[in-house]
Amino acid sequence: MDRFIVDPVEFAAQAERWIGDRIHLVLESSRRCYLMLAGGSTPLPIYQRLAMRKDIPWSRIDLFFGDERCVPVNTSENNYTMVMRSLFPDGDRPDGMNVYRMCGEENPDKAAEVYELVLPERIDILLLGVGDDGHTASIFPGSAALDEEKRRVMPAIAAKPPLQRLTITPPVIQSARYLLVMVQGEGKADAVRRALVDRSVPAAIALDGDWMMDTQAARALPEDQRLGF
Ligand code: 6PG
């Protein structure tokens, strides 16, 4: 449960380093690395940096998604499309790499059931973002997913478009071997402050993970809370 407050210009490099280090750590003792990525805009430069690294053994990685918007796959709002274009801009997926897409454009209930079947028992490395309302993955404030203890993937309704989504649930987040919550920008500062003191904030589900934020996202933290960073 490490906490990092980093300079905004260093954020993407520090997050990329955290991810790369844990991929190598997992693969020291496992044949495959189960890596689950976040959507949204914060991780984009981080994925682009990972794409430039020569030492990531993509052929030994199974890639999963923490949530998906129920939009056609080749639209810019689709997390799978954002991730694949960022990691593999030339469109070539490395041999041996498995990518498990949440088929959000299909029936959400059916797509959630199908995705549960491909999820490993435990994700090795899980990346999450935080919305300015405190959501994480597509678990939004007041969502039924907040209290879900059995299903590991479920349909969700977002507070902002695209409204229909699929999301992992707290059991997946809380069982991850390595968890990084990535938060950048002043617009997230209040959400971060609330998540650290109010368990009803969805991002609080991830409190046991590592949190990496820039100085702007951390600016609303009271001094005693900063001590944990
Ligand atoms: C999504 C994400 C979502 C995201 C937050 C933060 O599908 O939008 O998975 O949980 O991480 O909304 O988004 P930004 O990084 O764009 O601020």
Image: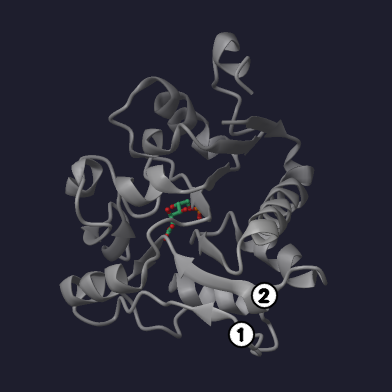
Is residue 221 among the parts visible in the rendering?
yes
* Residue bearing the label numbered 1: 96
Three-letter amino acid code at the position of disc 1: Gly
From the viewer's perspective, is residue 205 above or below residue 160?
above
Q: Residues within 10 Å of mark 2 (few under 14, many from 20)?
A: some
Judge by depth and name the residue closer to the eye, 62 or 31. Answer: 31
Q: Residue furthest right?
A: 54
Q: Is residue 151 left or right of residue 228?
A: left
Q: Residues within 10 Å of mark 1 (few under 14, many from 20)?
A: few
Q: Is residue 69 left or right of residue 27?
A: left
For mark 1, give the secondary structure: loop
Q: Indicate yes or no: mark 1 CB to ligand 1 under 8 Å.
A: no
Which is more N-terminal, label 1 or label 2? 2
Quarter of the image where the N terminus is located: top right
Instruction: State the image coordinates of residue 114 (x, y, percent, origin top left).
Output: 26, 76
Q: Is residue 94 left or right of residue 203?
A: right
Three-letter amino acid code at the position of disc 2: Trp
Instruction: State the image coordinates of residue 44 (x, y, percent, origin top left).
Output: 62, 62
Q: CA distance from mark 2 to mark 1?
A: 8 Å
Q: Are the residues tagged 2 and 1 within 8 Å (C-beta)?
A: yes
Q: Which residue corresponds to the image point at 72% horizontal and 58% vertical from the top-left?
A: 24
Judge by depth and name the residue closer to the eye, 17 or 61. Answer: 61
Q: Which mark is residue 58?
A: 2
Q: Which residue corresponds to the image point at 33% horizontal and 33% vertical from the top-left?
A: 201
